[in-house]
Image (cartoon, rainbow, N blue to C red):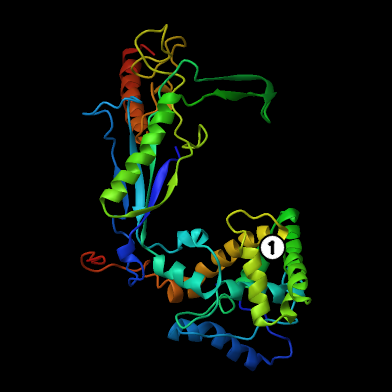
Amino acid sequence: MGPGVTGLIKELVGKPHTLDDGRPGGFYIPRFRNLKDRQPGFIRGYGYEGNSGHSMFPAHVMDTPGFGGQFKRSVRDHSGAFISMGAFGEVLPRYESYVDLDPETKDAWGIPVLRFHYHFSDNERKMAEDMVATGREMLEAAGIEVVGTDEKVLTEGWSIHELGTARMGNDPKTSVLNQFQQSHDVRNLFVVDGSSHVSASCQNPTWTIMALAWRSCDHLADEFRKGNV
Amino acid sequence: MTHAPKHPESLSRRDMIAATAAALVTPLLQGGAVTTQPVAGVPGKFLTAAEYALLDELTELIIPADDHSPGARVAAVAAYIDGRLAESLEPDLQARWRSGLQAVDGLSRELNAKPFLEATPDQRVAVLTRMAAGEADPKTAPERFFGELKGWTARGYYTSKIGIHLDQEYKGNVYQRGEFAGYDAK
């Protein structure tokens, strides 16, 4: 979603460069908010994705001011001394979030393009504030100097894990698909992508999409044998 | 590394090989400070000879040779940038670099009453210092060009063999034997 923190591990500045390929320098902190605690500002939670260590390209180069010998030495000394992490949070389902067909704009084949109606709410914005504050707290507790924070929430859709709009449920009045991702309205239509998700949770959705698709295929095969589809 | 800096055509093939070897192979094997002569009088794939020489000098000022590793000149950063400009399908980008280099000369005339490459080393640093002063919030044409110049210089240098292996001493892309030990910060 954008918010995150970057820290400098001073003890590593100017130290010999190490081979960090394959090291677990990329880390993941699973959701911890609103599991045992109860946050006053928001419901649900978020996880952090982060990394540290030496890489082939010194990504901090453009954040190192100036030019010349001092600049070059600073880039070299600070390689591998940074740690950064960014948060990905759940976006709540809302009736105001939906897609529809554009009445005017068509694609190259004459098919109306999709229009996305999708905005973050106060819950996401409050959660984003907590992402930065808690990330800072974690780094500082580890004795790491926080050298940068990203407080800006990136535009809706940036995370390219947008889900939902054909939510699953038992009631055809409030859902599009049943528990097997089969359309309530259109017989024999199965929607086996992320559209069936009721909420865009904070985890990467691909495995869930695959698991649900597998389940749908099993059901489809059973129903096919019975002659129901 | 993309291309070695172009050498004057008057060089014999033998000299060319020797010069190329000195510029490329030696620093990779031995490390340490190696400087070669600035490129002069040879046009790039996109830039004119004068523009190319100016760019070559600017990149070396941004990432100079020191006692640890060669600089942008030996890493052929100007050739990298010139090559990207030549391949670019964006006329705006090419025009921006051309006018950016002109802005550097313009600023040098303003500060030193002579073009950049005719100025003394101290005067050249003064020009670049002025350009870098607005790095956080660039306003003038030379200040805006500085960010792009520095970014491409860094991209060219730190993706070259010299930048990756000699300067950054990157140790990856090899088999790791035994257990990962890391560095003991204590």
Picture quarter containing residue A91?
Answer: top left
Expressed as whole percent of the image width and height from the top left, the position of residue A79 reads 40, 65
The quarter of the image holding the C terminus of chain A is top left
Residue B138 vertical placement versus B65 (above, below): above
The quarter of the image holding the N terminus of chain A is top left
Amino acid tagged 1: Leu
Residue A52 vertical placement versus B176 (above, below): above
Residue A204 visible somewhere in the drawing? no
- Judge by depth and name the residue closer to the eye, B6 or B147: B147
Q: Is residue B22 left or right of residue B56?
A: left
Q: Label 1 marks which chain's residue?
A: B
Question: Crowdedness of circle 1 by 10 Å Cα count: few (<14), some, many (20+)?
Answer: many
- For disc 1, the marked residue is B85
Tell me what residue is drawn at x 36 percent, y 71 percent.
A14
- Judge by depth and name the residue closer to the eye, B119 or A15: B119
- Judge by depth and name the residue closer to the eye, A92 or A7: A7
